[in-house]
């Protein structure tokens, strides 16, 4: 497997959260590296990063509700959006 250098990570997927209607009892695996093609959820791309410094964060909910998942990967409350995306600049 080709290794991805651990530089410039985590990758900012989007500069805004994504609202997901979660199902009770279902396990959600949130991507921490930003390389997933299934944002905001993990597709195991982190396993290709040199030294494997990233892993998914698994969460489960007791009730059906709308959750704001972070997509910038800078949240201090992973996997939930804490508006950290507002503190970074982005190029259109």
Image: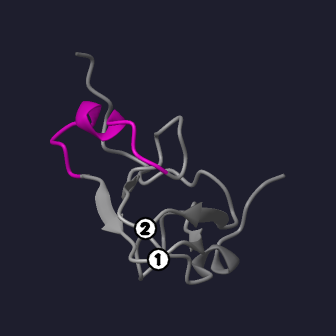
Furthest-right residue in view? 92
Tell me whether the residue at label 1 lies in contact with that at label 2, contact meaning CB atoms closer than 8 angstroms. Answer: yes
In which quadrant will I find the N terminus? top left
Furthest-top residue in view? 1
Closer to us: 70 or 90: 70
Classify mark 2: helix, strand or loop. loop
Which residues make up the magenta segment? 41-53
Classify mark 1: helix, strand or loop. loop
C-alpha span from label 1 to label 2: 5 Å
Closer to us: 33 or 17: 17
Q: Which residue is mark 1?
A: 63
**Left or right for 55, reference 70:** left
Residue at 55 percent of width and 83 percent of height: 82
Q: Which mark is residue 17?
A: none
Q: Which residue is mark 2?
A: 24
Helix, strand or loop for the magenta stretch, by majority:
loop
**Left or right for 88, reference 6:** right
Q: Position of residue 75 (x, y in %)?
A: 48, 76
Residue at 35 percent of width and 34 percent of height: 45
Q: Is residue 52 magenta?
A: yes
């Amino acid at each position: 497997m080709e290794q991805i250098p651990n530089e410039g990570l985590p990758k900012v997927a989007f500069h805004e959260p994504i609202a997901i209607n979660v199902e009770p009892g279902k396990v959600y695996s949130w991507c921490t590296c930003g390389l997933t093609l299934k944002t905001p959820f993990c597709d195991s791309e982190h396993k290709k990063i040199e030294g494997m410094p990233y892993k998914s964060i698994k969460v489960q909910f007791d009730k059906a509700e709308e959750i704001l998942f972070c997509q910038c990967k800078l949240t201090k409350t992973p996997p939930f959006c804490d508006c950290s995306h507002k503190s970074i600049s982005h190029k259109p």
